[in-house]
Structures are given as C-alpha cells and as structure tokens.
Image (cartoon, rainbow, N blue to C red):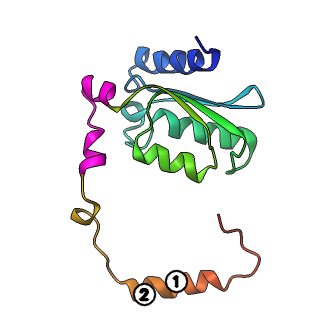
C-alpha cells in the first residue's frame, strides 16, 4: 500500500471515529513531505464545503503560506467531486491519486451523481450583468494586482 494513501485513509478514519463526516480523507505532499491534511468535516462544521480535499488544500495553503500549490500531489480516499476538483485546479495541483470511484461513493449513500447529471442552466440565472461588468471594469483598472 502506498504510504501517502495510508495517511489519507487514517485521516478519513479520524473523521469517522469523531463523527465529523463521511469516509473521505486527503493529504497533500510536496517534495516527499506531507504539507496538508484534511478529512470530511461537513457534520462537525455544518458546512457542505468541508470535504477532505478542501480541508487538505486549506491546510496546505496555511502551512506553505501560499494559495499556489504548484508541485504538490494530492492523495484522497475517493474520486474528487466537482467542487473539490475545481479547488484542486484553482490551487494548481496537477497530480491526484484517489482510492474509491464515484460508483463506490454512490454505493455507500452519497449523491455525487446529481452533480454530474444536473443541467447548470436549471440552477444558474444571469442577473444584473451590466452592473457586474462595471465592477469587473473597476477591478481591471487596478494597477499591480495579482490575477490568479
């Protein structure tokens, strides 16, 4: 067994044991060192964004004092959901190893498939675009800003 996946599994077990959420644990590794870890804390924090990957990204970013996790590798007990995958890409992690897949997750009662099968146009509605474009134009004109 891969030692980093074992760390992710143990992180998930910690969350299960403490009633924090589902069996989802993650670790982030850079240059052979674990720089971030997290497990599902949805129930603990009453926050649907506290997935293991999100918690590990937050932890690694704090520990490394950067939002750019280029060169890091993420190990996680389950295939990342779309939210977590988006955060992985935003953080510049480009290598992810996962244990269980979406079907496995569905088989234990999680509803990941809704995120793959919902038409975003059924949920998202454009509103006040012109006013928001003015805001974007203000931001665009700021000198020496970091765009990520």
Q: Is residue 97 magenta?
A: no
Q: How far is the residue under mark 1 from the one under mark 2?
A: 7 Å
Q: Quadrant of residue 125?
A: bottom left
Most extreme residue toward the top is: 1
Q: Quadrant of residue 50?
A: top left
Answer with left or right where residue 117 lies relative to residue 18.
Answer: left
- Quarter holding the N terminus? top right
Which mark, residue 131? Answer: 2
Answer with left or right where residue 64 lies relative to residue 125.
Answer: right
**Dot 1 surroundings within 10 Å: few (below 14), some, or many (20 or more)?**
few
- Residue 60: x %, y % from top left: 66, 38
Which residue is painted at 38% across and 29% down in the image?
Answer: 101
As rendered, which of 143 and 71 lies closer to the eye? 71
Report the residue marked by disc 1: 135
**Dot 2 surroundings within 10 Å: few (below 14), some, or many (20 or more)?**
few
Most extreme residue toward the left is: 122
Which residue is painted at 41% across and 18% down in the image?
Answer: 16
Describe the element under mark 2 as helix, strand or loop.
helix
Q: Main secondary structure of the magenta part?
A: helix
Task: Find the magenta span and give its range.
Answer: 103-117
- Quarter holding the C terminus? bottom right
Q: Is residue 144 above or below residue 6?
A: below
Q: Is residue 57 above or below residue 120?
A: above
Q: Is residue 111 magenta?
A: yes
Which residue is painted at 52% across and 83% down in the image?
Answer: 135
- Residue 87: x %, y % from top left: 52, 48
Describe the element under mark 1 as helix, strand or loop.
helix
Question: Are discs 1 and 2 less than 8 Å apart at CB?
Answer: yes
- Residue 14: x %, y % from top left: 49, 17
């Amino acid at each position: 067994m891969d030692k980093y996946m074992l760390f992710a599994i143990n992180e998930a077990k910690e969350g299960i044991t403490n009633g924090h959420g589902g069996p989802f644990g993650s670790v982030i590794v850079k240059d052979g060192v674990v720089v971030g870890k997290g497990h599902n804390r949805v129930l603990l924090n009453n926050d649907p964004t506290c997935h293991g990957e999100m918690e590990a990204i937050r932890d690694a970013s704090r520990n490394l004092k950067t939002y750019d996790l280029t060169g890091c590798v993420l190990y996680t007990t389950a295939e990342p959901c779309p939210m977590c995958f988006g955060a992985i890409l935003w953080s510049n992690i480009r290598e992810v190893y996962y244990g269980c897949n979406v079907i496995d997750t569905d088989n234990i009662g999680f509803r990941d498939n809704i995120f793959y099968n919902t038409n975003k146009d059924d949920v998202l509605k454009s509103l006040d675009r012109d006013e928001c474009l003015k805001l974007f134009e203000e931001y665009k004109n700021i000198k020496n800003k970091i765009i990520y």
